[in-house]
Each structure stands twice: as structure tokens, then as C-alpha cells.
Image (spheres, rainbow, N blue to C red):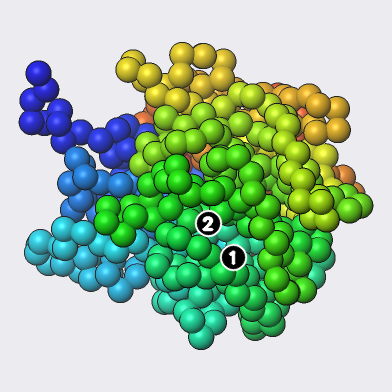
Amino acid sequence: MQNAAEDRRNRYFEGHFAPVKEEVTVYDLPVTDRLPADLSGRYLRMGPNPLGVEDPATHFYAFGAGMVHGVRIRDGRAEWYRNRWVRSTEVADALDRLRRGEEPPAFLPPSPNVHVIGHAGRTLALVEAGGLPHELGYELDTIGACPMAATPEGSSANAHSKVDPRTGDLHSLAYAIGRPFAQYIVTDPAGTVTRVTDIPLSGETPFLHDFALSENYVIVFDIPLTFSMTAMLFRWDPGHQARVGVLPRTGGDIRWLPVESFYVSHILNAYDDGSTITVDLIRSEGPVDVADPGAISPTLDRWTIDPASGRVDQRRIDDRAQDFPRVNDAFASRPHRYGYSAVSPMYGVPFTPDGPHPDEAFTNALVKHDLRRGTTEVHGFARDAAVGEAAFVANPSGRGEEDDGYLMSYVADPERGASDLVILSAQDFTGAPVARIHLPVRVPLGFHGNWIPDA
């Protein structure tokens, strides 16, 4: 029989998921090997970091107060590391109460904790399903709520807003719990909204975490994971018809294509191929419980969508469990050859009673997919390394080849009880890292981030 302490345990509140307790600033970080001298910018990654007021037994990992972790690189040096809570009004108030020795609220509403991007000269922390992004200063202080891509209905840049590298426009698929429509929003490079298209929804609000963007279309995934107003959580609804929506970028009506039930977590990329649309995505069979991501075994698939006939063909690219797909952003919305994904205890490594998946060689790894040749390369890390999402960073001195660049990711170093920012060469993917920046603290497993180069 379990005791009371065991009943209140939550694996997403401990180990590699355990929140850190302090905000830290450290300068002149030690580096193993050599940083590329022409890299100048910040690697930033977002994730939930509860303030310690939540009950582990009822804590939902995706609701923790957002914290951004950043490393500044310039002239071959790792100049600083900073971690900062994103100070929404509620988080700032809770932090003030804690400093005064007072009891903070038992529950905080979701704050920006999913993604961090750069657009229109701003650094933006993004939130899921409603709410405004929060602007961050260069050194990660919170400037405040930012009405980037805001509409009169309150929609704004969302968890997976995407920048088209050709136009510089920011594309967002915004939705809010209980609202019977989503909105496709285009924001120009100066931060001005230039187009808003309403997308009617039916039934309870579906989980629209990510979407696909090709050169001419927006692809929306209406899945059976919907928000239950009774339970106040996203839950699997077997009666909800799964469908894929195809919306012209220029606006107009969306066309819904029914498909078999599925769960989509993240999109690698999409592009137009004649009269069809190719979408590479991470999907899994339902039902799924988003409160237990380690139990999900998502795979990399390719969908070919024919808007004229309404046909959606699906095939498996790689049947090993993985998630957090990334592409060289210069090829976003255009044909791509390479994709990168992660295998970690967050997604892709199903938990067993004794811990993560027993496949030692594929427990913590980054994967490079050559989609033209149909081959993969795997860069494995130690079993307890807990690698997160890797962002692609183009080689500033390169000639524009698709895989001429680096992959950056925070990786746990269990021996030090801290984390490293590991930099791999995309063209020598299985080789030794180009460099390891040794952080003084542990970075918990989190969600998404980006390399934001200096202007």
C-alpha cells in the first residue's frame, strides 16, 4: 500500500522536470572545445517552472509559471547565462508574496511558458490558447504584455506562430477556450496585423497547439483532444470527428477533410508540391492523455493532402518514438530535405515502471532525417542526459546549404548536477559536439526555443 507521500508524487514535478528555485545570472561560462567565432546572439528556451505553490498530486506540468533560460554568445565566448520567470501580473504578484514571506495563491493561471521567438525587433514569450505574448528585454527581464498580432476579439500570436523567411511575416493560428472560432492572423515585419481570417469550429474547443504553413495554404488539425468545461482540462473525445482544414493564405473559406482519429503534437514543415500539399508531422494514435506525455509514442509521418479531391494519404517516415521536430527555418514553408527531432523523457521515451524506455541507445538522442534518401543519423547522449528540443542555427559564414549549420540544445549533465548547452554540427551530426557550454545550474526539461541572432 502506498503511503501519503507516495500518493502525492508526480513524475513531472521531480527529476529532470523538477523546477529550479532561483533566478541566476552568471558571466563568462566555461566552454569545452571552441565556439564558432561568427555566432552572435542568444539561445533562448521556454518551459514551465512552478513556483512551488502547486500540489504535486494535482499539478499539471503544462500550467507551471513560465521561465526562460538563455545563453548569450559573441566573439567565440559564452558571455552569460540567465534564467528568469516571465512576470505576468499573476506571477509577479506571487513572486512578491514569496519574497515577503506570505502565502501565494494555490493556483496561478497559465502564463507564457511554451515558446520564445523574435519578431519585429522584439523577444516574445508565447502562451497556449489565449492571452497575450509577453515581451522580454535583451537580458530576459519582462517588459510586459505585448499586443503583437492582436485582434479586436483578443486573439494574438500563439504557441507556434511561424515566420515566413521570404516575406518576414509572422503567421499565427490563435484560439481560446470556449470560443466557437479560431483566427488566422498575419503580422508584417514591423509588427502590424495585415490579415485576419475567422475559422469556424464546432463542438468543444479542440487542442490547436500547432499548425502547418505552406507557401499557399494554412493547414489546421482539428483533433479529438478537446477542452472539457466540466473537467477544465483537455480530454480525449472519441465522438469528435478528426479532420484537417485547408485554408488559402490569402483568406476565404476553409475546407475540412475528414480523417481517421489521430493526435498531432508538432509540425516539422509543409510545402506545396504541384496540386498537393506535403506535411511532415509528429503524430500518434489516440486516445492520448496530455497530462502524461511520457506515455505517448509519437512518430514522424508524411501526409500528402489533395485539396481538390479531398484525399489525405499518410505514410510513416520513422516509427521510432520522437518529437520536437525542427527544420532549417530558411526552408520553412518550402521543400526541405532535412529534419531534426528529439527523443527525451518529455516526449518520445515512454515511461516504464522502472523509468524511461529500456532502449539504452535511443533513450536520449537527437535525430537527423534525410528525407530524400530515407535515412537517419542519431546522436546519442547518456541515459540520464535528458536532451531537449534542438534549434537549427544557420552557419553565418556558410553558403546557404540546407544542413550547413548547428543544432543547439540544453542537455543534462548528471555528474555535475547541472546542464550544458550542446552545439552539434548538422553536417557532422554523429561526430563530437562542436562545443559544450557548461552552465552553473540545471535546466529542467521544457518546451520550445530559438536562436535569436543579434541584428
Which amino acid lies under the numbered mark 1 shown in the image of this protein? Leu
The residue carrying mark 2 is 208
In the rendered image, residue 179, in percent from the top left (x then y), is placed at 44, 71
* Residue drawn where x is 56% and y is 69% of the image: 200
Few, some or many C-alpha atoms within 10 Å of disc 1 (few <14, some 14-19, many ≥20)?
Answer: many
* Residue drawn where x is 76% and y is 54% of the image: 332
Q: In the depicted view, which residue is nearer to us: 302 or 187?
A: 302
Q: Is residue 18 visible?
A: yes
* Residue drawn where x is 82% and y is 45% of the image: 336
Q: In the depicted view, which residue is nearer to us: 31 or 181?
A: 181
In the displayed structure, 145 sits above or below 417; it is below
The residue carrying mark 1 is 173
Taking 197 as reference, is 289 left or right? left
Residue at the far bottom in the pictured view: 152
Regarding mark 2 in the picture, which secondary structure is present there?
loop
Which image quadrant is residue 292 in? top left
In the rendered image, residue 244, in percent from the top left (x then y), is placed at 65, 52
Which image quadrant is residue 353 in? top left
Which amino acid lies under the numbered mark 2 shown in the image of this protein? Leu
